[in-house]
Image (spheres, helix red, strand yellow):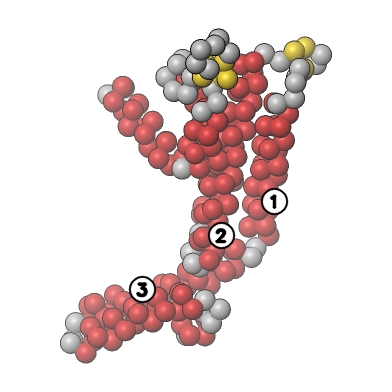
Amino acid sequence: EVSTQFLDSPTIADYCMKMLLEAREAYLIRDFATAEFYTQAVDAKLKRSVRSVRWSRSPAAWLLWLWELAVLGGSLALIAISYIPGLTLFGLPVALELVVLMRALAWGALGGVIGALYNMPWFAQFREYDPAYNMNYFARPLKGALIGGVLFLLSLAGIIAGNIVLPGSDESLGPIFLYPIAALAAFKQEYVLEYFDHLLRAIFR
């Protein structure tokens, strides 16, 4: 069954065959509990593989791809718009702080998209695509944008990624380090959310 089902994936087939080899060796020394464990692990992998292939090719997965690509295009467009000289909104000039916020949100959403596009193919490749994570993939760009907004507030407060002033002059480059930090934080947003969770636990003990 392993050699048939994983015919198109030698990596996974070798992984399962090694576990079956471990099961056989355990069986030969009459370690039946270990033999059963490895056998059941392969059986569970086969069942997860069937579900993974079915869901990774489903319309829901394609809609997720379209959503991620749409947010990717929207984020890049928002970043490009923010660099238009003399940007106006309803005929009024846009404040510099609002421009920085737009970029932080867009870079955060972009980092969230990159995280989703990194995780989705990886789990599909190893036949571990879990449809329970569909909502997480959908929300990653939104959470990334929120992380970008929080980092923008921290930047305004001067805690991280403040304005960069050229040495020997009064010319400010703005918070240029805010944008890569927002993208990286949104890409690995689990670490950021865990950090804030520990921080809030310490503050509101």
**Quarter of the image containing the C terminus?**
top left
The correct choice, above or below, for 91 with respect to 147 in the image is above
Front residue of 185/197: it is: 185
Q: Position of residue 150 (x, y in %)?
A: 50, 25
Toward the top, the furthest residue is 170
Give the residue drawn at x 42%, y 19%. 159
Q: Which amino acid does label 3 sit on?
A: Ala
Task: Look at the picture and state if 153 lies above or below 56.
Answer: above
Q: Are the residues tagged 3 and 2 within 8 Å (C-beta)?
A: no
Give the residue displayed 42% in from the left and 79% down from the top: 14
- Asked whether the residues under the numbered discs 1 and 3 touch, taking CB atoms below 8 Å apart as contact, a structural biologist would say no
**Do we see residue 65 in this rendering?**
yes
Q: What residue is shown with label 3? A: 41
Report x, y in % for residue 101. Answer: 60, 23
Name the amino acid type tagged 2: Pro
**Left or right: where 29 falls relative to 118:** left
**Residue 149 in sight in this render:** no
Q: Position of residue 35 (x, y in %)?
A: 26, 81
Farthest residue, direction bottom: 28
Residue under label 2: 121
